[in-house]
Image: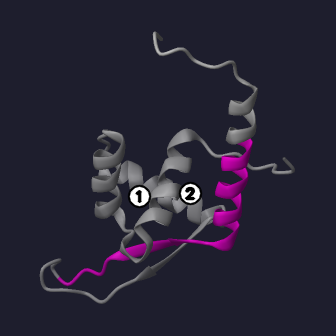
Amino acid sequence: MGRTTFLGEFEELMLTLVLILGDDAYGYTLLNALKEHRGRTVNLSTIHVTLYRLEKKGYLESYYAGATNKRGGRRKRYFRITNTGKSLLQEMKEARIQLWKLTPQLDSGV
């Protein structure tokens, strides 16, 4: 692995969920996806801080959708994964697979 930037577990989770959600990735949908797929509940602000950090690192980019009356005239900020982010996730996946191949088999009694 030639990578010098590492992600924390929650950053990796958010980056993966943005990839899964595609064009529907914004704070609230990520909050729901996190709860649905991982059983985790966090504050929306935790998600936003993580998304902004991933964007600053170059793994995500954001854009705004049109304002709606339902949101009081505010626009939604959507996120999408960059090619750099996709490469990083692929590299992390491959590293995990390589490590799991080295582990002894887990018996079902654990």
Q: Give the structural element (helix, strand or loop) at label 2.
A: helix
Q: Residue at x 54, y 49 (%)?
A: 11
Residue drawn at x 73%, y 53% as measured from the top left: 91
Q: Is residue 74 magenta?
A: yes
For the residues labelled 1 and 2, the Cα–Cα distance comes to: 9 Å
Q: Decide if residue 13 is on the left or right side of residue 95.
A: left
Amino acid at pointer 2? Arg
Where residue 97 sits: x, y (%)? Answer: 69, 40
Determine the secondary structure under disc 1: helix
Nearest the eye: 49 or 15: 15
Q: Which residue is mark 1?
A: 48
Quadrant of residue 68 within the rendered picture: bottom left
Residues in magenta? Answer: 73-95
Q: Residues within 10 Å of mark 1 (few under 14, many from 20)?
A: some
Q: Is residue 94 magenta?
A: yes
Whichever of callouts 1 and 2 sits on the residue coming sooner in the sequence is 1
- Nearer-the-camera pick, 1 or 52: 1
Q: Percent x, y for residue 12?
A: 56, 49
In the image, residue 89 above or below residue 60? above
Q: x%, y% of residue 64?
A: 40, 83
Lateral position of residue 52 relative to residue 40, left or right:
right
Residue linked to disc 2: 53
